[in-house]
Image (spheres, rainbow, N blue to C red):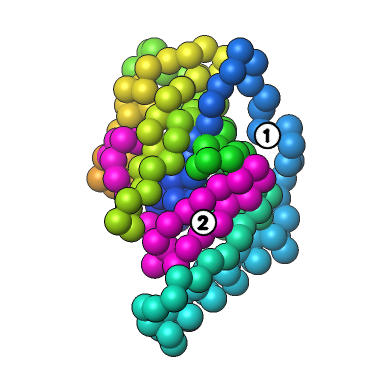
Amino acid sequence: MLKSRLCFQLAVAVLLSFSFGLSYSNPVQDSPGYSLEEALKVVSLIEKIQLEQLEKGSGELRNVVVTEREFNSYIAYRIEVEKEEVMKDLRMKFLDDNRVECMLVVDLREQKLPKILKPRMTLFLGGELEVKDGNVRLNLEDLFLESQRIQPAVLDLVIFLGSKITGEEAFSMSDWWVLPYGIKDIRTQKGKARFYY
């Protein structure tokens, strides 16, 4: 099962952030479904990174580029294959200067929830991705539940409830995360992310 924390790490590692203007375009409309071929391309890139680190060790910084569609296909593939219980969809738009847009669908049906929370929620969030010393965090600037702006503490509550369901340790969106797979830095441009390792 793709753990909620792992999925958030993957998302944050490839950038979670965006700047909402007066109107926000839903990233879901741009890429329905996913491509198995694109998902497996990302799996191959991860294997390449791991293999090169074993063979060459540390030295000259190398990089790989992952497109927005490839990344979203990889996440959708992992959610489906690992039968994620809480997070049902996660899609991102990569923007310039380490900014992205993120759409997240959380399904808490059949769980005992506070009445203020809907059992199935679509969240839009963003900010700026900050990378430092092999760690990354999202400086969350905006958070919407459906079309209503909400406080970031609500997302931490959703994460807490999800952690109780999956039996994982709770965390906060403001936490620092160790970059996975030996990645040292991430830089985004519109439609793609470059990972340095």
Q: Looking at the image, is 189 positioned above or below residue 147?
A: below
> Which amino acid type is shown beneath numbered disc 2?
Glu
Q: Secondary structure at mark 2?
A: loop
Q: Secondary structure at mark 1?
A: helix
- What's the CA distance linking mark 2 and mark 1? 21 Å
Residue at position x 50%, y 42% from top? 98
Q: Quadrant of the N terminus?
A: bottom left
Magenta extent? 171-197
In magenta stretch: residue 132: no
The residue that disc 2 covers is 82
Q: Earlier in the sequence, mark 2 or mark 1?
A: 1
The residue that disc 1 covers is 28
Residue 175 shows which numbered tag?
none
Residue at position x 50%, y 19% from top? 145
The 10 Å Cα crowd at callout 1, few under 14, some 14 to 19, many 20 or more, is some
Q: Quadrant of the C terminus?
A: bottom left
Q: Is residue 25 visible?
A: yes
Asked where in the image residue 64 lies, by quadrant, the reply is bottom right
Q: Residue furthest bottom?
A: 55
